[in-house]
């Protein structure tokens, strides 16, 4: 795993809407949906379903919007993966 991961956060002045299009399952179709959303530029941010945890969502930001530059980000902080993800032996409970 890369050792130089960092994270930071920005507060949005609103709760992003859920992407109105149904997100397709193929990678190329997902990328096309994303590209169209960025190109249209009608929203700074949008929520999409998480692929990992379907009950959760991720927020996509459109860097082509002029208001993207007004987002205030925290200082980047080092991100450490929990080592238990890589060393734990599976156990049956």
Image (cartoon, grey):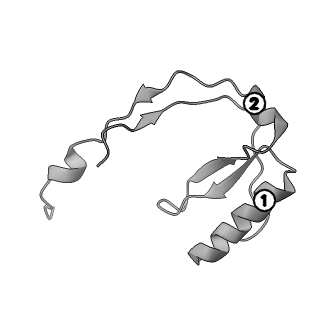
Q: Is residue 37 left or right of residue 91?
A: right
Which label sits in the foreground, 1 or 2? 2
- 73 w.r.t. 39: above or below: above
Name the mark on residue 37: 1
In this figure, which residue is indicated by the disc labeled 2?
69
> Quick one: SS at disc 1?
helix
Where residue 7 appears, as percent x and y from the top left, is 47, 34
Residue at the (66%, 49%) spot, across then down: 60
Where residue 62 appears, as percent x and y from the top left, is 73, 46
- The residue carrying pointer 1 sits among few (fewer than 14), some (14 to 19) or many (20 or more) residues within 10 Å by Cα, namely some
Per the model, the C-alpha gap separating discs 1 and 2 is 18 Å
Name the mark on residue 27: none
> Quick one: SS at disc 2?
helix
| Quadrant including the C terminus | bottom left
Where residue 41 appears, as percent x and y from the top left, is 84, 51
Where residue 86 appears, as percent x and y from the top left, is 20, 52
Q: Is residue 62 visible?
A: yes
Q: Is residue 49 left or right of residue 34?
A: left
Q: Where, by quadrant of the figure, is residue 68 drawn?
A: top right
Residue at the (37%, 34%) spot, across then down: 79
Which one is earlier in the sequence, the residue at label 1 or at label 2? 1
Residue at the (20%, 46%) spot, across then down: 84
- 38 w.r.t. 5: above or below: below
Q: Is residue 24 visible?
A: no
Circle count: 2
Nearer to the camera, 13 or 69: 69
Q: Is residue 7 left or right of residue 42?
A: left
- 38 w.r.t. 32: above or below: above
Nearer to the camera, 24 or 55: 24
CB-based contact (under 8 Å), mark 1 and mark 2: no
């Amino acid at each position: 795993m890369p050792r130089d991961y960092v994270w930071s956060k920005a507060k949005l002045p609103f709760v992003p809407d859920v992407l109105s299009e149904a997100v397709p399952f193929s990678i190329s179709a997902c990328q096309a949906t994303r590209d169209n959303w960025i190109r249209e530029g009608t929203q700074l941010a949008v929520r999409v379903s998480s692929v990992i945890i379907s009950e959760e969502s991720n927020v996509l930001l459109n860097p082509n919007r002029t208001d993207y530059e007004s987002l205030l980000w925290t200082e980047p902080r080092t991100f450490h993966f929990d080592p238990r993800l890589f060393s734990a032996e599976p156990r049956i409970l």
